Image (tube, grey):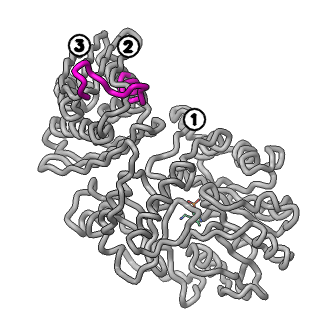
Amino acid sequence: MSTTRLDPVALAADFSAYVWSATTADVAARHGLRAEQVLRFDQNTPSLPGIPQIPLAESFARLNEYPDGTYRELREAAAAYVGLGAESWPQIVVGAGADDLILLCARTFLSGGRRAAIATPTYVVYRQASQLAGAGVGEEIEGADLIWRCNPNNPTGEVVAAAELVALARSVPRVPVVVDEAYVEFGGESVVLFLAEAPNLIVLRTMSKAFGFASLRVGYAVASPNVAAVLEERRAPAPIAGPASRIAAAALRDPRLDVVETVAERERVRQALSATGLDAPPTATNFVYVRSGKPLAAELEAKGLVVRSVAGGIRITVRKPVDNDVLLRALGVDAPLSPSRSATVIRTTTETALRITLDLDGSSRVRVATGIGFLDHLLTLMVFHAGFDLDLVAGGDLEVDEHHTVEDVLASLGDALAQALGTRNGVTRYGAATVPMDEARATAAVDLVRRPHAEIALAFAGDRVGGLALSLLPHALERFAMQAGCTVHVQASGRDDHHVAEAAFKALGRALREACAPGAAGIRSTKGAA
Ligand code: PMP
C-alpha cells in the first residue's frame, strides 16, 4: 500500500501515548508459560466481573437501535447513587469510561496557550489529555487553567480530605478543578456533596473499578448544573453502548460491591508486605503501592505474575486472597496464608492447562472459559447454585477431542474444593437437593466426610449437546468426587438431554451449598473421627 502523509496537529515533544501492560498471551510467550498460568495484578479491576442485573438476551435485543442519547436512565441512577437525588440527573454527564470524561474536560477547558496543573506521580491520562488539547502541563497551581486531582491517587493510593480539595477549588473559583474519584468506593470522602459550595469542582466516577464493569466502558462526571451543561454540549452524541448503559444503570440502582472484602484483603496484603520489610504505604484503593528500586515487575512477570510498573515501584491490584498468596510467596513474603475458604489451583499437563480460583464464601460470581460452551454453561450453573465464586480458565487439546479438558477441569475443581474446605471442621457435612428442569428431574446428595465415592446415573438419550460428548460427564463427576474427597450421588432423567444435564449440575450445586455451609456442631461421624 502506498504511504499517505497526513498532517496531524503537532504534539508536545515529551508527549507519550498510553501503554498497556503486556497481554496475557505476550507474557506467556515471553516466559515459556501457558496463558492459564498467568495471573494479572495490574488492572485495578476486581478479578471477577460485576453481575449484569439485566438479562443479556434483553440487553442485546435491540442492537439495530441507537441508545437513548440523553442517557436519562443512567444519569438518574448515577445522580441517586452519588447522593444528589435522581432529580439532579442534569448534573451527570456520561462518557465511555472516566477516560472519555478526562478527554472531554481537557477539550472543554484547555487549548494551545493554556496550562494544566497536575500533581505527580498520578494517573498518566491527565497529562496525555492536556497535551492532546494543545495545553502545557506542570505542577504549579498558580495561573493554571485546569487542575487535575486524583483522590484516592493512582498509583500511590494516597488520599486527601475532601475539605482540602474544596478549599483548593474555592481558592481558584474560575478554574475547573477535576477530582477523579475512580477509587472512591474503597476509601476517602467524595467531594460531590460540596458542589454547591465549590461549583468549579468536576467529579469523575467510573463503573470500571468497584463495580467490576471495565469492559462496558461507562463513566460519568458530576458537576454543578451550568458546568455540566457546558460539558454535555461538547460530549459525543452516543458515547456508551445501549446494553452497557442499561447494565450500568441497574448496577447503580442496586450496587453489589465487594468493597468490605477487598479493603480487608488489601490491608492483609499490605501488612504482609510491610512485615517483610517492603515499603508499602497506606492506601485507600483496591491496590497496594510498593516503593522499590529493584526490578520487581520484571522478576514477577517471569513467574507469570503481572503487576504494573509505576514511578518509583510497582502497583499490585488486590485479587482474591488465595491469588494474593501466590504473589506474596513469589515476593518472598513469609506471612500467614489467608484464612479464607478458598483455593487457587494452577495445573499444566501435556494435554491441558488450567487455572481455578474458588471461594466457598462467594456470591455466585462465575467466570468459566474452558473452550467447551456447554461445559461452561453447566459449571456456571453448578457454581451459581452453590453460591461460590469461581474463576476458571482452561486451554485443552480440543483439536484432539474434549475428553482431557472435561476430565481435568472437573478433577481440578474437586482439588480446589478439597483445598478450600481445609480441615472440614465446622461444615454442615451433608447436603441434598432435588431440582426439576421442565420435564427433567435430578437429585443430588453430598457427604463431605473424607469417603470418596461416586454414584452417578445420568439418563441421556443421545450422544452430544453442543460440543460436549455426554458420556464424559459421569466419569468427570466421579473424578470430581474423588479429588474433592467426598461422597457424591447424582441421578437425573428426562426427555431432553440438555435439561437432564442442567438439572444434574444445578442439583449438585444446591447440595454442595448445603453441605459446605458452616454447621452448628461441625463435621462429626459416629466413629468420632472427621
Ligand atoms: N482514572 C483513574 C485514576 C484510573 O486509574 C483509571 C483506570 N486505570 C481511569 C480513570 C479510567 O477509568 P475508565 O475505565 O472508567 O476509563
Residue tagged by mark 2?
A: 434
Q: Measure the C-alpha gap from mark 3 to mark 1.
A: 34 Å
Residue 106 drawn at (x, y percent): 69, 73
Residue type, mark 3 in image = Ala
Residue 184 drawn at (x, y percent): 64, 59
Q: In the picture shown, does residue 434 fall above or below 512?
A: above
Residue tagged by mark 3?
A: 459
Q: Does label 1 point to a residue whose CB lies under 8 Å from ligand 1? A: no
Instruction: Judge the density around disc 3: few (<14), some (14-19), many (≥20) Cα neighbours within 10 Å.
Output: some
Q: In the picture shown, does residue 192 fall above or below 417?
A: below
In this view of the protein, which residue sits in the foreground, 102 or 209? 209
Looking at marks 3 and 2 on the same chain, the residue that comes earlier in the sequence is marked by 2
Res. 292 image quadrant:
bottom left
Looking at marks 2 and 1 on the same chain, the residue that comes earlier in the sequence is marked by 1
- Horizontally, residue 164 falls left or right of residue 526, namely right
Q: Does label 2 point to a residue whose CB lies under 8 Å from ligand 1? A: no
In this view of the protein, which residue sits in the foreground, 219 or 255? 255
Residue 263 drawn at (x, y percent): 54, 55
User: Please, what is the dominant secondary structure of the magenta stretch?
Assistant: loop
Residue at 16% over, 43% down: 399
Residue type, mark 2 in image = Thr
Instruction: Judge the density around disc 2: few (<14), some (14-19), many (≥20) Cα neighbours within 10 Å.
Output: some
Residue type, mark 1 in image = Ile
In this view of the protein, which residue sits in the foreground, 80 or 62? 80
Task: Tell me the SS state at disc 1.
Answer: loop
Residue tagged by mark 1?
A: 54
Q: Quadrant of the N terminus?
A: bottom left
Q: Measure the C-alpha gap from mark 3 to mark 2.
A: 16 Å
Q: Which residues are magenta?
A: 511-530
Q: Quadrant of the C terminus?
A: top left
- Is 342 magenta? The answer is no
- Horizontally, residue 235 falls left or right of residue 42, namely right
